[in-house]
Image (cartoon, helix red, strand yellow):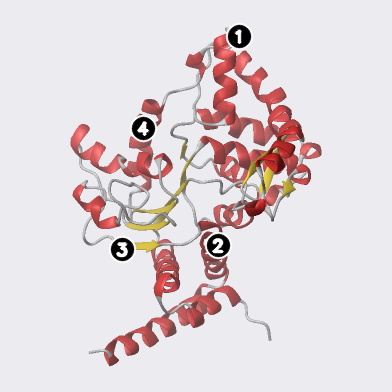
């Protein structure tokens, strides 16, 4: 009989040391946290939407494994691009051997390469632009002000299925919009549509004020964090580094020191990053450093997986989805794996 939890069993059986052990332990601990009533906040940098993380992230949102998000403007829009223009993407698995002429040829094909895949200019950027720009212009006429993501939430929920090329069940943006997940998009100006919006502000046909600022994002996040951190608290699952992670994790010390209000610390932390520990690098900073900034405490479960998030994150989400579907069987596998680890540790003493 086929196993109901093949991914979890694979992790438990094979992931014993190095980054594999960190992946295993983080997965087990993530499940402990949400199974016990805790919530989880996902911070997503890099080009994870172009790498199709939605295949596992969207089901994770549906299953209640993710309760809030911080994403870059690029990840936000690229989830939408994958939905409306999936069949028009081109892959370039030989990209490591490209010359400048090869990339110039891709440019002339009106493709925008992201490592080994590429976003189609006309079917993605320009197709969405035809819908989003009128929304901005209407907001300018009506004096409406929204957060950056609210325009995308509104767009993706109203988009007719005839416009879909990708599988809507693999679009994390659509699932987040349906669930009305709290989300921040720090530094959204640094994205393709951030640039497009700036051009229309320069033209004078859109007002810059129709998009709420990053400061307003943090002011709203104060309230979201207080709500999300009730009970067992909320964990912080960080993919990559940079502003997507640094912006939301700062909410705890800001509430404590700037608002001078009581606040619960982040209840759990895991970062997947291939950035090596280095001087002054946020992406390569170890969790212990965050203790000094009052973002985490010495009692916070902490995990660092120094690996490629496009490999690790889908594996973790797949295992967690199995845990959610078969919790008793998952607990047995996890308990057996932990018992074996304890026996191994005892032999070293």
Residue on which disc 2 sits:
311
Distance between mark 3 and mark 4 Cα atoms:
25 Å
**Res 246 quadrant in image:** top left
Quadrant (top left/top right/bottom left/bottom right) for the N terminus: bottom right
Which mark is nearer the camera, 1 or 4? 1
Residue 179: % across, % down = 56, 44
Question: Which mark is on residue 301?
Answer: 3
Per the model, the C-alpha gap separating discs 2 and 4 is 31 Å
Q: Residues within 10 Å of mark 1 (few under 14, many from 20)?
A: some
User: Going from the N terminus, do you reach mark 1 or mark 4 first?
Assistant: 1
Report the disc number at residue 80: none
Read off the residue under disc 4. 218
- Identify residue for label 1: 205
The quadrant the C terminus occupies is: bottom left
Q: Is residue 225 left or right of residue 334?
A: left
Asked if residue 214 lies left or right of residue 191, the reply is left
User: Marks 3 and 1: in contact by CB < 8 Å?
Assistant: no
- Disc 2 secondary structure class: helix
Foreground of the two, 225 or 115:
115
Q: Number of marks in the image? A: 4
Task: Sort mark 4 into few (<14), some (14-19) or many (20+) by Cα contacts within 10 Å.
Answer: some
Residue at (40, 43) in percent of width and height: 242
- SS at badge 3: loop
* Image vertical order of residue 215 relative to residue 51, above or below: above
Of tags 3 and 2, the one toward the viewer is 2
Which structural element holds mark 4? helix
The residues tagged by marks 1 and 3 sit, at their Cα atoms, a distance apart of 49 Å
């Amino acid at each position: 009989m086929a196993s109901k939890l093949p991914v979890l069993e694979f992790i438990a059986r094979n992931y014993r040391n190095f980054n594999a052990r960190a992946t295993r332990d983080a997965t087990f601990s993530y499940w402990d946290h949400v199974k016990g009533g805790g919530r989880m906040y996902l911070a997503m940098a890099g080009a994870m939407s172009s790498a199709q993380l939605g295949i596992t992230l969207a089901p994770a949102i549906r299953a209640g494994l993710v309760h809030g998000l911080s994403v870059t403007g690029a990840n936000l829009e690229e989830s939408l691009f994958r939905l409306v223009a999936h069949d028009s993407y081109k892959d370039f698995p030989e990209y490591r051997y490209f010359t400048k002429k090869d990339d110039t040829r891709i440019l002339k094909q009106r493709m925008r390469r992201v490592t080994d895949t590429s976003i189609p200019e006309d079917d993605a950027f320009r197709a969405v632009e035809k819908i989003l720009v009128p929304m901005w212009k209407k907001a300018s006429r009506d004096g409406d002000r929204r957060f950056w993501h609210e325009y995308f939430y509104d767009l993706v929920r109203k988009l007719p299925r005839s416009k879909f090329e990708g599988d809507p069940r693999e679009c994390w943006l659509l699932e987040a919009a349906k669930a009305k997940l709290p989300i921040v998009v720090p530094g959204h100006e640094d994205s393709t549509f951030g640039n497009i919006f700036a051009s229309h502000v320069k033209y004078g046909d859109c007002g810059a004020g129709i998009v709420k600022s990053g400061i307003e994002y943090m002011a709203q996040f104060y309230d979201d964090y207080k709500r999300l951190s009730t009970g067992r608290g909320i964990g912080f699952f960080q993919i990559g580094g940079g502003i997507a992670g640094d912006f939301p994790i700062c909410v705890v010390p800001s509430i404590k020191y700037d608002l001078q209000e009581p606040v619960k610390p982040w209840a759990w932390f895991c970062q997947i990053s291939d950035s090596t520990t280095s001087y002054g690098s946020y992406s390569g900073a170890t969790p212990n450093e965050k203790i000094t900034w009052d973002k985490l405490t010495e009692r916070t479960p902490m995990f660092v997986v120094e690996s490629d998030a496009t490999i690790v994150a889908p594996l973790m989400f797949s295992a967690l989805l199995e845990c959610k579907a078969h919790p008793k069987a998952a607990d047995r596998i996890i308990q057996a794996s932990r018992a074996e680890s304890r026996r191994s540790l005892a032999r070293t003493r």
